[in-house]
Image (cartoon, grey):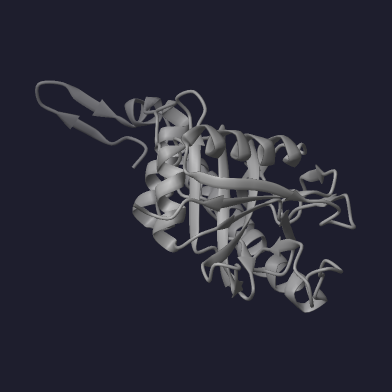
C-alpha cells in the first residue's frame, strides 16, 4: 500500500494520504469523553443533592425542639427545620384570599414542571413572574394551604412571600385561624445543607412580618390587629437551606372583616 496511486485527473499517492489530518478523530473522541464526564458529574450531583442527603437527614431526624407539641417553626419535606412562624390571620378561606389581594399580594402558583421551567427562565432573563411558585414547607404534617408573594423589581429571585396553614382550632367567632411564615427572598443559590437549588432568605424575618402587617393594614381588610409577645422562645436559628434567621419573638395576628 505504500506505493498506492490513483491516476486520472490527479494522482493520489501514499504521501497524499499521510498529509490528511489525523487529529480529527482524536478530537471527536476527546469531546465524547468530556461529555461523558460532565453527564456523570451532573448525575452524581442530582443523586446526592436530591436523594442521598435528604434521606440521610430523614434518618437523622433533625428536628427543631418546638415542633413536636407546639409548633413555632415549619419543617422541610426531608425533616430540616424551616422558616419560623411570625404572622397569623383569623378568617375564612375566602377572607384570607380577599384581604391578601386587597393588600397587593399575588397567590403563588403550585409547584410543577411548567411553573418550575417558567420561574427558571424568568429568573435568568430577569422577567416578571407575579405568581412564581414557592418551595413547600410543612406544618401540622402537611404543606402550606396557601402561599402569597409580592415581586420586587422584575426578577423572581427577589420577592416578599408568606405561606399559610389552617390551624385545627378556630377563633372566638368560629372562623379559621391561619398561621403563617413570612420571609424575604434575597437571591437564588445552592442550599447550604443539601446542595439543591433554592431561594435564600434574609435573616431579618421580623422586617418581613412587619411588611405583611403594614400592607394588610393599608389594604383595609382588617377589623383589628395585635401581637402575641414572646411567641418564640428560640430567637434565632437556621432554615432548611442553611440560611440564618433572627426574631424578637413576637407573632403578629390580623382579624379580617366579615365579608360583605
Residue at the far left: name it: 9
Q: Residue at x 76, y 45 (%)?
A: 243
Q: Total of numbered circles in the picture?
A: 0
Q: Can residue 132 be seen in this view?
A: no
Screen quadrant of the N terminus = top left
Whole-percent x and y of residue 79?
72, 69
Whole-percent x and y of residue 30?
52, 42
Question: In the rendered view, would you say 21 is above or below 2?
Answer: above
Q: Which residue is drawn at 37% across and 43% down?
A: 118
Whole-percent x and y of residue 195?
68, 52
Q: Which of 147 and 166 is in front in this view?
A: 166
Question: In the rendered view, would you say 60 is above or below 153?
Answer: below
Q: Would you say 122 lies left or right of 201 here?
A: left
Q: Is residue 48 visible?
A: yes
Q: Nearer the viewer, residue 12 or 76?
A: 76
Q: Which residue is drawn at 45% across and 25% down?
A: 154
Q: Would you say 237 lies left or right of 92 here?
A: right
Asked where in the image residue 244 lies, by quadrant, the reply is: top right
Question: In the rendered view, would you say 250 is above or below 68?
Answer: above
Q: Which of 211 and 36 is in front in this view?
A: 211
Q: Would you say 231 lies left or right of 76 here?
A: right
Whole-percent x and y of residue 29?
48, 45
Amino acid at each position: 500500500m505504500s506505493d498506492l496511486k490513483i491516476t486520472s485527473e490527479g494522482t493520489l499517492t501514499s504521501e497524499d494520504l499521510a498529509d490528511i489530518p489525523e487529529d480529527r478523530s482524536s478530537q471527536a473522541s476527546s469531546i465524547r469523553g468530556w461529555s461523558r464526564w460532565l453527564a456523570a458529574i451532573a448525575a452524581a450531583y442530582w443523586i446526592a443533592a436530591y436523594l442521598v442527603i435528604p434521606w440521610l437527614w430523614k434518618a437523622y431526624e433533625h428536628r427543631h425542639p418546638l415542633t413536636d407539641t407546639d409548633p413555632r417553626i415549619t419543617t422541610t419535606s426531608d425533616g430540616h427545620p424551616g422558616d419560623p412562624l411570625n404572622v397569623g390571620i383569623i378568617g375564612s378561606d375566602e377572607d384570607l384570599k380577599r384581604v391578601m389581594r386587597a393588600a397587593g399580594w399575588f397567590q403563588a402558583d403550585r409547584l410543577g414542571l411548567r411553573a418550575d421551567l417558567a420561574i427558571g427562565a424568568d429568573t435568568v432573563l430577569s422577567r416578571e413572574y407575579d405568581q412564581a411558585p414557592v418551595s413547600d414547607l410543612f406544618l401540622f404534617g402537611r404543606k402550606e394551604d396557601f402561599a402569597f408573594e409580592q415581586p420586587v423589581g422584575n426578577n423572581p429571585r427577589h420577592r416578599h412571600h408568606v405561606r399559610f396553614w389552617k390551624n385545627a382550632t378556630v377563633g372566638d367567632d368560629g372562623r379559621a385561624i391561619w398561621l403563617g411564615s413570612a420571609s424575604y427572598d434575597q437571591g437564588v443559590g445552592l442550599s447550604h445543607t443539601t446542595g439543591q437549588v433554592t431561594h435564600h432568605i434574609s435573616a431579618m424575618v421580623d422586617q418581613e412580618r412587619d411588611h405583611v402587617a403594614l400592607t394588610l393594614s393599608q389594604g383595609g381588610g382588617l377589623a383589628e390587629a395585635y401581637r402575641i409577645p414572646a411567641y418564640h422562645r428560640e430567637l434565632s436559628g437556621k432554615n432548611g437551606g442553611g440560611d440564618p434567621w433572627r426574631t424578637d419573638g413576637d407573632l403578629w395576628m390580623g382579624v379580617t372583616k366579615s365579608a360583605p
